[in-house]
Amino acid sequence: MKYEILDSLPNYGPMYVPVTGDDEPYYSQGFAVRFYKDDNSEWVANFKPGWSKLNLVYEFDKQQHFLVIAGGVCYIMSRNDTKAIDVFGDGYESVIVARDGRLILQDTTYITVLEPNGEHWNSETISWDGLKDLKLDGNVITGLSYDPMNKQNEWVGFCYNLDTKVLSGGSYK
């Protein structure tokens, strides 16, 4: 076992380690994860959450790193280090795993693609305020984006090619 998602911070044992994107202390209940180091010791991370309800841990197949999403904030972590390698985002709502190992993270206005090596990049803005019904077919993401200017049909389709990074449709343009 390399990690364990906890229901709450432990009441006993060593103090948890607050993990934040700004290195500021964080003492409220966040997303608690126990990591088991290579030397069989363990430590508990208390990740400061963002603005959504998405909490998960994803282990990269060929890397020693983990993606921890705490309330929509992404933390790239090593189980042997208490400091995040990278922190980004604040409101991711869902994740789609592609066949090639890429992760597609859905925010309210754009998507972020996280490569298997930990590198990430954002699409251009797709929506004014909301994406839904995302589907992945090969390397193309389709879905609906919210358009507050269109009273006839507030949800309009879009198509985004992950390889060429070309957006068709959407409500923001």
Image (spheres, rainbow, N blue to C red):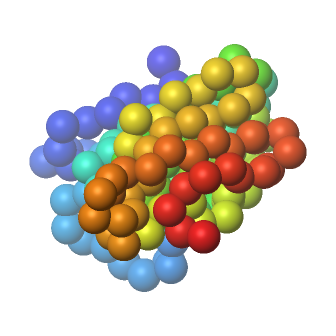
Q: Along the horizontal axis of the image, is 77 left or right of 74?
A: right
* Point 75% across, 40% down: residue: 161
Position of residue 134 measured from the top left corner of the image (x, y, whole percent) = 47, 35
141 is higher (above) or lower (below) than 164: above
Q: Quadrant where the C terminus lies?
A: bottom right
Q: Along the horizontal axis of the image, is 77 left or right of 24?
A: right
Residue with the most extreme left position: 11
Position of residue 49 measured from the top left corner of the image (x, y, whole percent) = 33, 61
* Nearer to the camera, 17 or 26: 26
* Nearer to the camera, 42 or 73: 73
Choose top left, top right, bottom left or bottom right for residue 160: top right
* Point 13% across, 48% down: residue: 11
* Nearer to the camera, 166 or 5: 166
111 is higher (above) or lower (below) than 62: below
Position of residue 32 measured from the top left corner of the image (x, y, whole percent) = 30, 47
* Point 26% across, 49% down: residue: 53
- Inspect this view and state whether residue 146 appears: yes
Position of residue 147 measured from the top left corner of the image (x, y, whole percent) = 39, 63
* Nearer to the camera, 155 or 49: 155
